[in-house]
Image: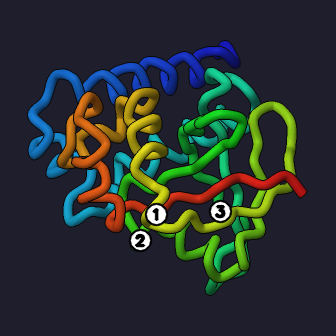
């Protein structure tokens, strides 16, 4: 069997997964892939495969694999995220809110994490105050189509709309160590 076959299958599944936000109503997408605000079993497997490929630099540079230490297990946990750039700063946003495991792990480790995308980068994640999140969330939705079903605001909405929902979505500034 060709070594490219599994990578090709994951890539095709990723394309389907990332185009569904445009084709399915947002409530269906959330119910199918993130019931109860948590990833379904299929979604977890696909996310793991995508994170593994992202860590090796297969996907575009706006995607990174974030490695955090589990707050209970202490094991390394890898998750694929979209990097939002505002000016010269890089930001990571949790589309699933405060209850996402990577957010809890980042808080438990005082922001210590590793970014991977072909190279390894030791970073510190700093919480961004709610009052400063609106422009970052807007920039994030411009580049993260898979996150759009999780937001109750359109990517083209004015900043005032983003200010209303900013408290629901944690945002972290990426600081290189």
* Circle nearer the viewer, 3 or 2: 2
Q: Residue 142 carries which label?
A: none
Instruction: Identify the residue at image location x=18%, y=41%.
Output: 29
Which residue in the structure is indicated by mark 1?
170
Residue at numbered disc 3 = 77
Mark 3, secondary structure of its residue: strand
Check the image and report above or below for 165 versus 140: below
Compared to 145, does 35 lie above or below? below
Image quadrant assignment for residue 36? bottom left
Instruction: Farthest residue to the right: give it.
Output: 177
Number of marks in the rendered image: 3
* Residue 31 horizontal/vertical position (percent): 15, 51
Mark 1 or mark 2: which comes first in sequence?
2
Residue 110's image quarter?
Answer: bottom right
State the image quarter where residue 56 is shown: top right
Tell me the residue at 24%/59% (across/down).
164
Label 1 close to label 2 by CB (< 8 Å): yes
- Position of residue 111 relative to residue 153, above or below, is below
Say whether disc 3 or disc 2 marks the residue closer to the N-terminus.
3
Badge 3, how many Cα within 10 Å: few under 14, some, many 20+?
some
Q: Where is residue 174 in the image (x, y as percent from the top left)?
A: 71, 52
Q: Quadrant of the N terminus?
A: top right
The residue lying at 65 percent from left, 82 percent from top is 108
């Amino acid at each position: 069997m060709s070594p490219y076959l599994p990578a090709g299958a994951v890539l095709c599944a990723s394309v389907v997964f990332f185009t569904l936000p445009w084709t399915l109503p947002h409530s269906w997408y959330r119910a199918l892939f993130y019931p109860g605000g948590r990833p379904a079993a299929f979604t977890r497997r696909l996310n793991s495969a995508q994170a593994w490929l992202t860590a090796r630099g297969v996907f575009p540079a706006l995607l990174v694999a974030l490695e955090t230490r589990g707050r209970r297990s202490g094991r390394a946990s890898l998750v694929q995220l979209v990097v939002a750039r505002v000016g010269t700063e890089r930001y990571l946003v949790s589309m699933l809110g405060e209850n996402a495991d990577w957010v809890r792990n980042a808080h438990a480790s005082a922001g210590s994490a590793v970014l991977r995308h072909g190279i390894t980068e030791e970073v510190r994640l700093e919480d961004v105050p709610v009052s400063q999140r609106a422009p970052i969330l807007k920039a994030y939705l411009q580049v993260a189509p898979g996150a759009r079903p999780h937001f109750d605001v359109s990517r083209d909405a004015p900043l005032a709309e983003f200010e209303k929902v900013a408290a629901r979505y944690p945002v972290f500034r990426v600081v290189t160590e």
